[in-house]
């Protein structure tokens, strides 16, 4: 499945969503759409913080999947 990100003017958003949801082969991820909307409204400072948090969560997922090795507390502190 392919994914597509579109920028739609606020005034046309509702109409566009009504149209696109009528196609049986289109799946709209409402949670992801809302999250992207909220991210766009963040200030540059908050956006940078949010980006760091998301990066950390991705790292945790990779550790849980065994794709990368977790660091011990001692290794973490030595990096500081």
Image (cartoon, grey):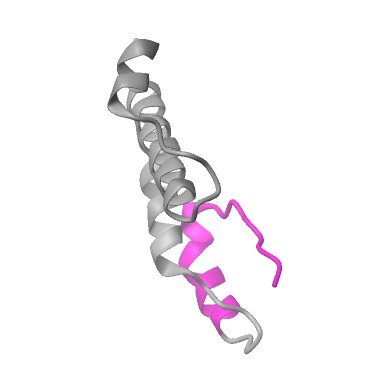
Residue 15: percent from left, percent from top:
51, 71
Q: Kindly give the residue lying farthest to the bottom in the view shown.
A: 24
Residue 48: percent from left, percent from top:
40, 25
In terms of image quadrants, where is residue 53?
A: top left
Left or right position of 22 against 2: left
* Residue stretch in magenta: 1-21
Residue 38: percent from left, percent from top:
36, 46
Is residue 13 or residue 58 the one in the foreground?
Answer: 58
Left or right position of 15 against 78: right
Is residue 22 or residue 39 the one in the foreground?
Answer: 39
8 lies above or below 70: below
In terms of image quadrants, where is residue 47?
A: top left
Q: What residue is at 30 percent from the left and 16 percent from the top?
A: 77
Q: What residue is at 37 percent from the left and 20 percent from the top?
A: 75
Residue 78: percent from left, percent from top:
35, 12
Q: What residue is at 62 percent from the left and 79 percent from the top?
A: 26
Viewport quadrant of the C terminus: top left
79 lies above or below 29: above
């Amino acid at each position: 499945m392919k994914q597509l990100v579109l920028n739609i003017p606020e005034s046309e958003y509702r109409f566009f969503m009504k149209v696109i949801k009528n196609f049986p082969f289109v799946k709209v991820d409402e949670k992801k759409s809302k999250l992207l909307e909220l991210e766009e409204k963040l200030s540059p400072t908050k956006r940078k913080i949010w980006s760091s948090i998301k990066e950390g969560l991705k790292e945790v997922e990779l550790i849980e999947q065994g794709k990368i090795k977790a660091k011990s507390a001692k290794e973490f502190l030595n990096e500081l």
